[in-house]
Image (spheres, grey):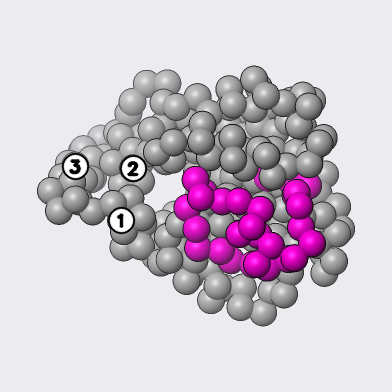
Amino acid sequence: MNYILKKVHQKSIQIHNLYTYFKISSIEWYNIIAGVYDFLGDFYKRPRIEFINNLGIKQGDIVLDLCTGTGRNVSYLAEKVGKKGKVFAIDSSKGMLELARKRFYNQTNVHFINVDCEDLTVEVLKKYKEDIEQVDHIFCSLGYSVMENPKIVYGKSFRLLKHNGQYAIMDLFSEKSNFLSAIIDFLAFAQSKRKSWKIIENNCKDIYHKRYNVMSGEIFVISGRKK
C-alpha cells in the first residue's frame, strides 16, 4: 500500500508541476479534472448527507451552495427546500457546472450559476429571482480549502445571509501531511491545513461542530447562525 501511495504521490507532483509550468489557473484545472472530481465525490457521502439532514432546511427556504462543483449537494438540498424553495448552485468552473446541469437538467428549483464566489452579489442572484434580497442558508462543501481568498468570499457571502440564517461548511483538514493529503493538496489546489471552521466560530452563534476520521486526515462539518 505504501508503495502505491508513493507512486501516486509522485504522479501528483508531476501533474502539479505541469499545470504550474503552463500557468494553468485553478479554474482551468478544475475544468480539466471535472470527471475525476465527480467520481471522487462519493467518498464523503456519509458526512455530507448527515450534515445536510441536520441543518434544519425547510420547505420554501432559499439555499446558496458555494463551490457546488459537479452538484453532489444539489439533490439533497433541492429535496429539502421543495418546489417553493430555491437552490443557487455557484461555481467558477464551467466544466464542473456542465456535469451538474446534465445530472439535474429537470430540477426546476435549482439555478446553476457560473461565477467566482469572490464576485457573488445579490445582483447576480436577482437575474434568477427578482425579489431576492438575502438567503436562508449558505452551504459550502470542500470549497474553503481551495479558495484563494477565503476571507473575501466569506465576507461577501455572509452579507447575503439573513439575520439568524445559517452558514455551514464541510471540508477536509489534515494537521500533519500524509501521502493522501499531499495528493489532494496537489491535485485540487487545496490547503488541507487551513482551519476554515474558525470563520464560523468567530462570526456565528449556535455552533454545531463534528469531525469524521478519513484516510487523508479529517472531514469537519460546522454550522452556525448569523448574529
Q: Earlier in the sequence, mark 1 or mark 2?
A: 1
Q: Could you tell me how far apart the alpha carbons at marks 1 and 3 are, in whole angstroms?
A: 14 Å
Mark 1 residue element: helix
Mark 2 residue element: loop
Q: Which is nearer the eye, 113 or 208?
A: 113
Q: Which is nearer the eye, 19 or 226?
A: 226
Q: Which residue is mark 3?
A: 13
Are the residues at dot 2 and dot 3 in contact (C-beta closer than 8 Å)? no
* Residue 135 on the magenta span: yes
Q: Going 59% across and 26% down the picture, which residue do you hit? A: 199
Q: Earlier in the sequence, mark 2 or mark 3?
A: 3
Closer mark to the observer between disc 2 and disc 3: 2
Q: Going 38% across and 33% down the picture, which residue do you hit? A: 191
* Residue 36 on the magenta span: no
Q: Could you tell me how far apart the alpha carbons at marks 1 and 2 are, in whole angstroms?
A: 9 Å
Are the residues at dot 1 and dot 2 in contact (C-beta closer than 8 Å)? yes
Amino acid type of the residue tagged 1 in the rendering: Trp
Q: Earlier in the sequence, mark 1 or mark 3?
A: 3
Question: 10 Å neighbourhood of mark 2: few (<14), some, or many (≥20)?
Answer: some
Can residue 28 be seen from the camera position used here? yes
- Residue at far bottom of view: 106
Q: Is residue 209 above or below residue 52?
A: above
Amino acid type of the residue tagged 3 in the rendering: Ile
Q: Which residue is mark 2?
A: 189
Q: Going 32% across and 28% down the picture, which residue do you hit? A: 178
Mark sitting on residue 55:
none
Q: Which residue is mark 1?
A: 29
- What segment is highlighted magenta in the picture? 110-138
